[in-house]
């Protein structure tokens, strides 16, 4: 019963679409109406509202981080902590509130990894930042970070629940970026900071 409650609570927390919540609170366009129509911070940044993008990033990362920390405070076992983190990530990608059409999960995954092992979270964030700084492609940074995450998890924590959860998140994150991979190969991907060409009023 405790396992079911932990995982359900983590999923529901992960399902909170902070991009939409913050955008509505600050009365700007719904992120599903412009750019990539994604509910992540990168797409919100295309609206030109940096504060909204920052709040979205903090909310998406924070929900993954909080889900794991709350479970840890309630004395959940390491296996359950990893499962809780994975459920929070799945909640963001497939949110019940949005008919299971969610974001790609980069920020939420980062929050989860920081809570599971701060060294792992930091390593993945460094990879993402380094690639984005060099290329100005957020998607390329996410793809490289997803590839690096299981490797870092294995080096830092060995074979165990953290590696399994990290590998599952990385696989789903890569799948969610399949369209971006095609755009990168064709040279059509948008760079960080580029405003949406058209947005709904």
Image (cartoon, rainbow, N blue to C red):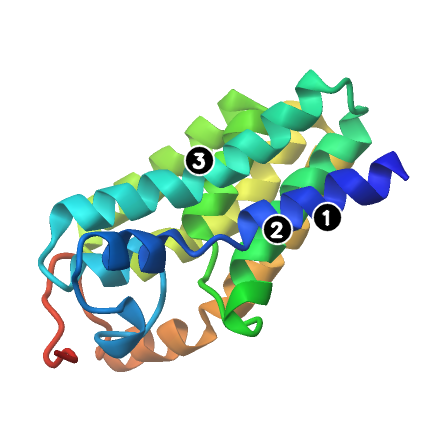
- Name the N-terminal-most of marks 3 and 1: 1
How much space separates mark 3 and mark 1, taking CA atoms?
17 Å
Marks 2 and 1 close (CB-CB < 8 Å): yes
Residue 126 on image: x %, y %: 35, 34
Measured as percent of width and height from the top left, residue 135 is found at 20, 55
Residue linked to disc 1: 8
Q: Earlier in the sequence, mark 3 or mark 2?
A: 2
What's the residue at 14%, 78% (across, down)? 199
Residue at 68% from the left image edge and 43% from the top image edge: 9
Nearer-the-camera pick, 50 or 5: 5
- Judge depth for marks 3 and 2 and give the one in front: 2
Q: CA distance from mark 3 to mark 2?
A: 14 Å
User: What distance separates the C-alpha of mark 2 from that of mark 1?
Assistant: 6 Å
- Give the residue at x 10% y 64%: 194
Which residue position holds label 2?
Answer: 12
Number of marks in the rendered image: 3
Name the residue beneath numbered marker 3.
62
């Amino acid at each position: 019963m405790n396992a079911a409650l932990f995982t359900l609570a983590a999923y529901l927390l992960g399902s909170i679409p902070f991009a939409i919540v913050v955008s509505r609170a600050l009365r700007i366009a719904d992120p599903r109406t412009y750019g990539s129509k994604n509910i992540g911070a990168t797409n919100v940044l295309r609206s030109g509202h940096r504060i909204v993008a920052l709040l979205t990033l903090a909310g998406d990362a924070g929900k993954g981080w909080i889900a794991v920390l709350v479970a840890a405070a309630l004395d959940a076992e390491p296996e359950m902590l990893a499962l809780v983190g994975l459920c929070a990530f799945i909640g963001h990608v497939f949110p019940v509130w949005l008919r299971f059409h969610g974001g790609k999960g980069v920020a939420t995954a980062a929050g989860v990894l920081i809570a599971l092992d701060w060294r792992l979270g930091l390593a993945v964030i460094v990879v993402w930042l380094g690639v984005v700084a060099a290329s100005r492609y957020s998607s390329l940074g996410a793809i490289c970070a997803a590839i690096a995450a299981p490797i870092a998890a294995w080096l830092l924590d060995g074979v165990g629940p953290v590696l399994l959860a990290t590998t599952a998140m990385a696989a789903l994150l890569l799948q969610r970026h399949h369209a971006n991979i095609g755009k990168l190969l064709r040279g059509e991907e948008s760079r960080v900071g580029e405003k949406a060409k058209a947005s709904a009023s």
